[in-house]
Amino acid sequence: MPTETVYGLAASATSEAAMTKLAAAVGADGPVHSTWHCPTTERALEALPITHAAHRRLIESLTPGPVRFLLDLPIETIASTIDALGAQRGAMDDGTAIALRIPDHPLATLVLEAASEPIVAHGIAAAGWGDGRTLDALPASHGADAGVGVVLDDGPARLGTPSTTVRLTETGGVEVVREGSYDARTIMAVVRRRLLFVCTGNTCRSPIAEALASSLAPGVVPAGMTIEASSAGVAAYDGAPATQEGLDALAEMGIEPGTQSGTRSGQAHRSRALTRAMLEEADEIYALTRSHRDAILSLDPTADSRVHLLDPAGGDVSDPIGGSAEVYRQTAAQIAEMVHTRLSTPPSPS
């Protein structure tokens, strides 16, 4: 049957006879570990023990679509999950991971929804029937000699390239095992939050917020998610260093701006004038005051749903410029609390 990527040899995962035929068709000497082709994202999330936020976000964002997930699980969890689905052991798992795919093809979805049991599939290229995009290389017997009962031909597959394989580790990590229809950058962008902090001159408040976001992220955001923090100013000029008072306040917190892995360059902070391109690249934009938010929206009104005040309560963060060391300490502490809240609970689009 067709999918959006390639044609697949599909079989009932509940039938030992069907799985034996599938193994023979792809030339496997023993049982073949195939991929569960689930009709909907909702069904997959109900059936599989998805416990990590990053994993759920990937599945919800990339399915239906050309991605094959390998969900690493303890062996006893795999066994209980497979049994609950009524599938043969090893049909959709290799003993360490369950393989999942949710195709984005109307005919495939109809077949999978109509089936009363889980269906697994292998690309027809594994049987030596061409590159998988068409059925041109299907044997003249229409695969009957390989035990194929029904052939569904819907013309060339839309993408014609294999799915991208992504491993979801037990600890919440994400690994791109093999690139296919999506490249690794596209996959990883789903579990990355790009945060842009905006103040006036980009030498006091927003650099403090940037450094704190990168420093606090590992202890706050779910496993598998990454934070990329940057900052800019609505009235900044390029190249100015962060204020020494701000650096000192951060140093007292054990943070050296620009050294965190999630910052712009891994180098000492230098101010940047806010540009529309910066706004377009950011997933979340945090203004230090309402006037900064207004300036951002005057530059790019389309960013409205991604622009928020850093203060979840809707207040302004006062500018400490010209203040004492104690003023900077208080400002840094205030920003730290707000950043922690924002990292813990991403805002809904407004």
Image: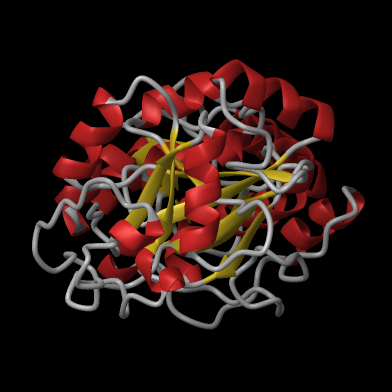
- Image location (x, y in percent) of residue 9: 36, 55
Q: Is residue 65 above or below residue 243?
A: above
Name the spot of residue 297 as percent of width and height, x first: 22, 48
Which of the 4 image quarters holds residue 49?
Answer: top right
User: What sort of colour scheme is used for the picture?
Assistant: secondary structure
Residue 217 position in % (x across, y down): 71, 46
Q: Nearer the viewer, residue 39 or 66?
A: 39
Q: Nearer the viewer, residue 40 or 293?
A: 40
- Which of the pair 273/312 is nearer the observer? 312
The percent coordinates of residue 178 (x first, y second) are 55, 71
**Residue with the most extreme left position:** 155
Rendered position, 125 above or below 24:
below
Q: Please tell me which residue is depicted at 66% across the width and 51% down the height of the picture.
A: 31
Q: Residue at x 70, y 76 (%)?
A: 266
Residue plotted at (22% across, 63% down): 142
**Residue at the extreme bottom:** 239
Of the 4 image quadrants, the one containing the C terminus is: top left
- Residue 205 in the image: above or below residue 267: above
Please indicate, yes or no, whether residue 201 appears anywhere in the rendered image: no
**258 to the left or right of 185:** right
Residue drawn 38% across the image and 68% down it: 162
Q: Is residue 28 visible?
A: yes
Q: Looking at the image, how many numbered discs can be counted on the residues?
A: 0
Nearer-the-camera pick, 314 or 37:
37
In which quarter of the view is residue 210 placed? Answer: bottom right
